[in-house]
Amino acid sequence: MSELGFIDPTYIPKREIIPLAKRPASLAGKVIGMLDNTKEQADVIFKTIGDVLVERYGAARIVVMRKEHYTKPASVELLDTMAKDVQIAIAGLGG
C-alpha cells in the first residue's frame, strides 16, 4: 500500500525575478523592432505605432518581423536576426 504525501495548498513556488531591460532616454535615431504575432490587425497596429515613433519621437526606422503563427513562440533564428538589427524591440498582439 502506498502512502500519499501531504500537499500544502498554500505553497507558492519561488519564481525567478527577471529584471526589466533598461529603457533608453530617447528613441531618436534608434532602430525599433516590432514582433508581429500574426493575429488579426497586428500589422495595421504596428504600422500606425511605427509611423508615430518615427514622426514624433525621431526613431531612425521600424523593422517589423512576423512570427510563424500566434500559437507558436518566435523561432530562435527570428529573435537572433531581430537582436542584430534593432536596438529596441516591441512584441505585440493583434485582435
Image: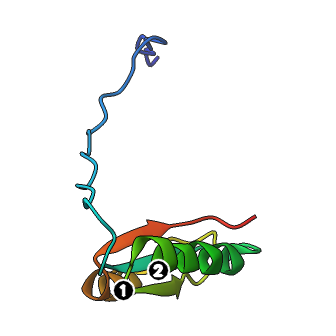
Mark nearer the N terminus (2 vs 1): 2
Report how far apart the C-alphas of labels 2 and 1 lie in the structure: 6 Å
On the image, the x and y values in percent for residue 14 come to: 30, 29
Tell me residue 78's x, y (percent): 40, 86
Is the residue 62 above or below the residue 16 in the image? below
Image location of residue 21, percent across then percent down: 26, 55
Disc number for residue 32: none
Residue at (34, 70) in percent of width and height: 27
In the rendered image, which quarter is residue 40 located in? bottom right
> In front here: 34 or 14?
34
SS class, disc 2: helix
Task: Give amino acid for label 1.
Answer: Ala
Asked if residue 24 is positioned above or below residue 42 in the image, the reply reads above
Q: Horizontally, is 55 left or right of 26 in the view?
A: right
Q: Is residue 51 left or right of residue 63?
A: right
Q: Secondary structure at mark 1?
A: loop
Residue 92 visible? The answer is: yes
Figure quadrant of residue 59: bottom left
Disc 2 and disc 1 in contact, CB within 8 angstroms:
yes
Q: Which residue is mark 1?
A: 60
Residue at the image position 51 percent from the left and 85 percent from the top? 64
State which quadrant residue 60 falls in: bottom left
